[in-house]
Amino acid sequence: MNATVRYILSRIRHNLLSILLIIALALAAAVVVTMLATPRYTATATVQINDQSENVLGEDLGADSNSNVGWDVERFLNTQLEVLRSRDVAERVANSLKLYDDPAFIAAMELPAESAAGPVEARRQMVVGLLQSNLGTDLPHETRVVRISFNSANPEVSARIANAFAEQFIQSTLQRRYDSSSYARTFIADQLQEARTRLERSERELNAYARRAGLIRSRDGSNGEDGPATGSSSVTTASLSQINEAANRLSAERIAAEARWQAEAAMPALSSPTVLANPTVQQLMTDRARVDAKLETLRARYLDDYPEIVQLQAERKSINEQIASVAQSVRNSVRSQYVSALEAEQALRSKVDGLKGDTLAEQDRTVRYNTLAREADTNRSIYDGLLQRYRELNASAGISSSNLSIIDRAEVPGGPSSPNLLKNLLIAFVIGVFLAGVFVFVRDLLDDAIRVPEDVEQKMNMALLGVIPVASADNPDDDLADPKSPMSEAYNSLRGQLLYSTSEGLPKIIQVTSARQSEGKTTSSNAIAAGLARMGKRVVLVDADLRRPSEHKRHRLANQHGLSGLLTGADTLTADTLHEIAPNLDVITSGPVPPSPTELLSSPRMAHLLEELARRYDCVVLDSPPVLGLADAPVLSALSDGVVFVVESAGSRTGVLRTALRRLRAMNPVILGAVLTKFDPSHSANTYSEYYGYEYYRYASPDHAGG
């Protein structure tokens, strides 16, 4: 992760000028666009959206309910916003403000006046499209107040249209509600007509059947718990019920009369309470008592044949006869009541028995009648329910208030809402940063140069042996002569890498080559050889570039004898060919340039020469020619124990390097790794800059202590 961040920072630093230029151009374009843009004004109105509208009647008729449960509030509010942004509301606004032929509106939309002279349908679509595209709606979180804004080049037009949208939004809601109830009324009216037709048909069928069956029934139209037939009864059933009730009543009366008669018959006449309660009997008994009293008085004075006594006795006898006659009449009346009750009961019982038969016969005929009656009652219930619902809809149509209310009407804006210079600069800055990022990414993607040490491993898939900084002066030999210079320290690090580059340690024969010339292979060859020699190892540096030799010039040596003479047999390994330039370090120059260097380098004598040198020295360093265009370097790689591939920083292309490596690997050599030369960390700002850049650790001068 840190390596990725450092790599990104290095790319930014490498392309810093381009990045700043792109951002500056974006900011400049934003300023120009802002200055050239026409000022536009935004007017805003606010509308509150409630869950449910108030009902003027105060009744819940159910036809216009907008109540929402908690989980559905957000969906309800979003639906209201979509309605606000709909084409229907925009058309209502255009119609209410007559915008189709309004030149002020056309000018506010920054359209030419000729655009209002087109066909009617085209103008309608244009105006509606302009209204919808310039309308802004915003519903802040956790609120029910929606902001309705309109943007145009005219502040008065913006305020007028914003208020029109708020008003028409409310009107549209009310109109949809009324239309919805109208649809419901139409539907209920159709259903009501069908129910009326079914009811009339079922009533006619019921009456026709009753006429055919001879049934006379009374129906009150009520539905009891037992079904719709409980509200109707036939004449026969009613008569049976009435006569049966009368028979039961007479039976009770007969029982009472029979009990009274039996009581009367069981006791003497003058002991009967009924007889004694008779007024006539009571009067006669009073008269008899009076006569008895007179007789008692006269008998005390006269004999029984006394005329007055005889007369009183005759009167008393007559009274007794009258009492017996009246008592018998009273008892006869009690018996007559009993007999009458019995006869009446028997007559009614006989009639009840007759009506029972008629009722049972009628019940067989009323089965179909009851079925038809239930169907008629069901149709009537449906008809009554639909009729009631239709009346409610007619009563509630268009009388409920809206669940929308205007909180703030739009006012004419005092200043333009756009263009906003600060906002445009911020957007331009973001766009500029994005474009700069795209530029850096594309440039880095298309850039196949090896610039930083990471490129060696990522683009070439090779091990990095060392990084050699660029020389402080034009001549790198001056830096190599200073053992405290960064270049000397870098080659010392490279030398340490070579000492452990193979399982056997330092290779005996090391070839130093590059893809093309002037990449620093000769300097690297001399530095490697000199560094190993300073360690006490006997090293020989061979100038194997037989086409453009340079070692004799570098060390100011004669070039009459050298490698070419050794390969042709003209020279031997003597002091004429082995030049000691430093302790433990000898140099074999190239010798005269032969006509066919490749044939000499690929001859058996080259292999025998290297074997001989490997026996005499601890290490043989071959300064070979570049790989591309020549067969010399691949031939030498097959004879070497290890190949050091030199890559020039910012000068080598990945495609060229891969081609060179492909040619080398065709000989199956041991490639030890790559050395990045001429590296300038101050320009690359890579992950190695802390060691090789301005913060590179240097030896302290005599006047300053190291940090």
Image: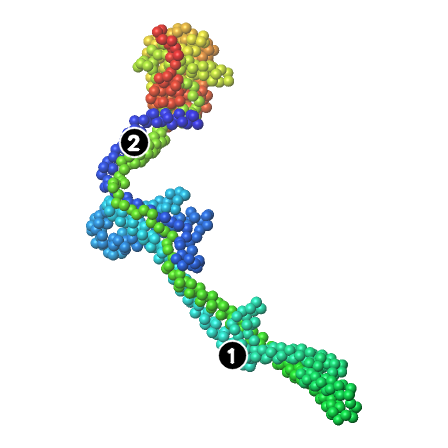
Task: Name which quarter of the figure residue 603 lies in.
Answer: top left
Q: Quick one: label 2, few (<14), some, or many (20+) residues within 10 Å?
A: many
Residue 466 lies, in percent from the top left, at: 41, 18
Q: Could you tell me which residue is drawn at 67 percent across and 83 percent down?
A: 279
Task: Identify the element where label 1 is drawn.
Answer: helix
Q: Could you tell me which residue is drawn at 58 percent across and 68 percent down?
A: 226
Q: Could you tell me which residue is drawn at 35 percent across and 27 percent down?
A: 12
Task: Identify the element where label 2 is drawn.
Answer: helix
Whether 37 is drawn above or below 180: the answer is: above
Q: Farthest residue to the front: give it.
A: 301
* Quadrant of the image containing the N terminus: top left
Q: Which residue is mark 2?
A: 23
Residue 326 lies, in percent from the top left, at: 70, 87
Residue 502 lies, in percent from the top left, at: 48, 18
Residue type marked 1: Ala
Q: 322 or 455: which is nearer to us?
A: 322
Residue type marked 2: Ile
> Visible in this render: residue 573?
no
- Disc 1 and disc 2: Cα gap in Å? 98 Å
Whether 627 is drawn above or below 69: the answer is: above
> Visible in this render: residue 141?
yes
Q: Which residue is mark 1?
A: 208
| Image side of residue 336 versus residue 98, left or right | right
Q: 77 or 362: which is nearer to us?
A: 362
Circles 1 and 2: CB distance less than 8 Å? no
Whether 292 is drawn above or below 415: the answer is: below
Q: Nearer the viewer, mark 1 or mark 2?
A: 1
